[in-house]
Image (cartoon, rainbow, N blue to C red):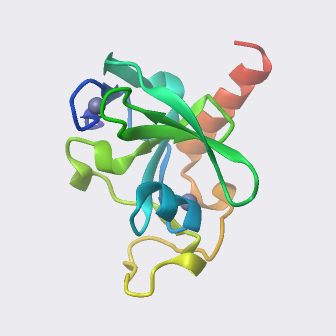
Amino acid sequence: MSVVREGGCACGAVRYRLASEPMFTHCCHCLNCQRQTGSAFVINLLIEADRVELLAGAPEPVDVPRDDGSTQRIFRCPTCQVAVYSNYGYAKVLFVRGGTLDDPSSIEPDVHIYTRSKLPWIALPDSAPAFEGYYDSKKLWPEASLERLEAVRAAATSGA
Ligand SMILES: [Zn+2]
Ligand SMILES: [Zn+2]
């Protein structure tokens, strides 16, 4: 039985509900995420785009440059400009920003990534694995989540 999670921007114009648990949750300590958030890290809930139900508003995409020359599409409330989710060039999977949940404490990261640029005063918990860079999702994700990701990819290639 999964928890119903809702969240939104600061002004309330954008509201969303997650139709299920995320596939996996990242805590990313990379420099791009630090710059984008103006903070120490970002918490990203990886979930199928069609499981993010918009209850109000229409987040607007902004393409933001990253250090590797690629861009990341960040969706912001058109009014208050708070970023609610993003994607990395693959529109079918959204990275919902954990801090925009009504109850951010309801989620814990499944993994800490890019810890090589982690701010030195942050102590990581023992409860989740940590990697200096990225990681192998096949080794870390639960089987059910890997199947969900596979289903998203299969739908994309069949044009659905
Ligand atoms: Zn807003
Ligand atoms: Zn990052």
Residue 25 vs residue 77, the one in the foreground: 77
Residue at 68 percent across and 45 percent down: it is 71
User: Which quarter of the figure is the C terminus placed in?
Assistant: top right
The image shows residue 93 at horizontal and vertical percentages of 58, 34
Residue at 57 percent across and 54 percent down: it is 141
Residue at 59 percent across and 71 percent down: it is 114
Image vertical order of residue 37 relative to residue 57, above or below = below
The picture quadrant where one finds residue 51 is: top left
Image vertical order of residue 121 relative to residue 4, above or below = below
The image shows residue 85 at horizontal and vertical percentages of 45, 38
- The furthest residue to the right: 157
Image vertical order of residue 51 relative to residue 76, above or below = above
- The furthest residue to the bottom: 120
Residue 137 vs residue 103, the one in the foreground: 103
User: Which quarter of the figure is the N terminus placed in?
Assistant: top left
Residue at 35 percent across and 40 percent down: it is 82
Residue 5 vs residue 58, the one in the foreground: 58
* 74 sits to left or right of 40: right
Residue 86 vs residue 71, the one in the foreground: 71
